Image (cartoon, rainbow, N blue to C red):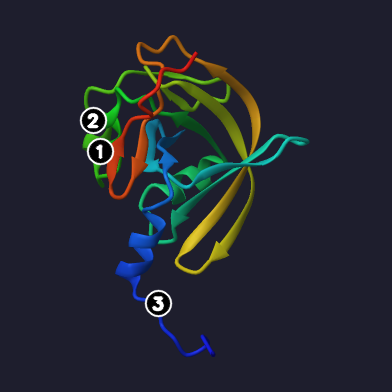
Amino acid sequence: MSFASTAIEPSRFREALGHYASGITVITSYVDDEPVGFTCQSFHSVSMNPPLVSFNVMASSYSYPKIRQAGRFVVNILSNAQVRISNQFAQRGAAKWHDVEWRPSPLGNPIIAGCLHWLDCEIHAEHTAGDHLIVIGEVKALNSQEAVATQPLLYFKGQYCNLGVSAG
C-alpha cells in the first residue's frame, strides 16, 4: 500500500495530535524596553550536557521575531491555576501583559509570577520545519517559584485538564 499520494487533512492531523497530553508554557523575552511572549505547548528537553531545551513556533508568529532579536528567552512552566495567563498569551496584541505580574530573570527575561518553574535561556539554534521554526535554547539559569498551585497546566483533546492526583 502506497501512502505517498495520500494527503493528511489538517483537521484530522490536529485531532490525532490532540491525543497527546502536554504541559503549557509561556515563552517570554524583553526587547526594546517591552516584554513579549506567547503561549506554547510544544516545549521539551533536548540535551543534558549542555543543558538544551526546545520549543516550536509558527513561522508567521508576531512575537518570535522580537525574541530572536533579543537572543534569549524564559520558559515559564504554567500551573493549573494559570488558565487565564495561557489564554491571554495565546492572543495577539499588547493586552497579553494586562494584569500579569512578572520580575526579570538573571538574563533580563520576564518570569511570570505563580508559574511552577522557569528556565532562562539563550538561543542556541533555530531550524525551519514546514510552517514552524524549531528553536533550541541553552539553559543558563533555572528555578522553581513559590507557586500557590503545585499541579501543572495540561492540555488534552483541545481543552485544559488536571492530573487528578496530587504531586508529592
Q: Is residue 67 visible?
A: yes
Number of the label disc, if any, that sits on residue 84 = 2
CB atoms of marks 2 and 3 within 8 Å? no
Q: Which of 166 and 25 lies nearest the eye of the viewer?
A: 166
User: Which residue is found at the position 40% from the left and 77% from the top?
Assistant: 8
At which x and y percent is residue 10?
Answer: 34, 71
User: Which residue is found at the position 26% from the left and 47% from the top?
Assistant: 92
Horizontal side of 94 relative to 25 (left or right) equals left
At which x and y percent is residue 45?
Answer: 62, 40
Number of the label disc, if any, that sits on residue 36 = none
Q: Which of 41 and 57 lies nearest the eye of the viewer?
A: 41
Figure quadrant of the N terminus: bottom right
Horizontal side of 157 relative to 70 (left or right) equals left
* Nearest-to-viewer mark from 2 and 3: 3
Answer with mark 2 or mark 3, whichever residue precedes in sequence.
Answer: 3
Q: Secondary structure at mark 3?
A: loop
Spatial distance from mark 1 to mark 2, Cα to Cα? 5 Å
User: Which residue is found at the position 41% from the left and 83% from the top?
Assistant: 7
Number of the label disc, if any, that sits on residue 87 = 1
Q: Secondary structure at mark 1?
A: helix
Q: Is residue 156 above or below residue 77?
A: below
Q: Name which residue type carries label 3.
A: Ile
Q: Name which residue type carries label 1.
A: Asn
Q: Secondary structure at mark 2?
A: helix
CB atoms of marks 1 and 2 within 8 Å? yes
- Disc 3: which residue: 8
